Amino acid sequence: MTTDTMSPEALPLDDFWQLIDVARGQVTPDRPFADVLTDVLAARPPQTVLAYERSFTRLHDELYRWDVWAAAYLIGGGCSDDSFMDFRAGVIAQGRAWYEQVRESPDSLARHPIALGGEPELLEEILFDEGVNYAAAKAYPRALGDPEAWDTMVAEGYDADSPEETVLGEDFDFEDESELRRRLPSLTALLIGGGAGS
């Protein structure tokens, strides 16, 4: 395996988000986003799949923050480390505009159309999307025509990016409702009720 294969460049952001949009446009009740995204990626050259994964990892890591985790905690009624990975993947799956809003202010999720539609509990269903984390790993062997390709590459030392080490931002107790209301007033009001409105 060549060095180029082991260390691909990230996709330009416009190209990355275009792939997300293409997949979003093909979702049906029988074909969830993660499955469609895998199909979209598998139809691209293998290097594009690896470049996508590097971009995905970087965008995913940018949401590795306490305030974003608090939003996931509120929406999910709790949120483990693994669930937080799924939540960040689900935010990416919402497309560029929502990703950028959440990165700027996680409290903006209180204005998501699902939340505004009167069923805020459905936010959990759409935002915790485990399968999105593995789209490239499933697509790459198909794109290369080698069922063992991803496992072989990982065994040889491939890593999309450096591992996460610390959560960014100021740590706080997610079970402290007053802190949640101060930091995420709209989401707290939506999901817990009372207090500060949106």
Image: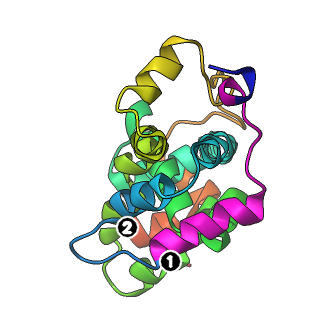
Furthest-front residue in this view: 145
Residue at left offset 50%, top offset 55% = 41
Where is 86 relative to 196, above or below? above
Which numbered marker is on residue 112?
Answer: 1
Q: Amino acid at mark 1?
A: His
Q: Which mark is residue 14?
A: none
Label 2: element kind: helix
Q: Is residue 13 above or below residue 164?
A: below
Kindly indicate whether the residue at mark 1 contacts the one at mark 2 (C-beta within 8 angstroms). Answer: yes
* Element on which disc 1 rests: loop
| Residue 123, numbered label | 2
Which residue type does callout 2 highlight? Answer: Leu
Eyeballing the image, is 103 above or below 158? Answer: below
Horizontally, residue 88 falls left or right of residue 151, namely right
Residue toward you, 86 or 116: 86
Asked whether residue 16 is drawn in magenta, I would say: yes
Going by the image, does 126 lie left or right of 197?
left
Main SS type for the magenta part? helix
> Where residue 53 sits: x, y (%)?
59, 42
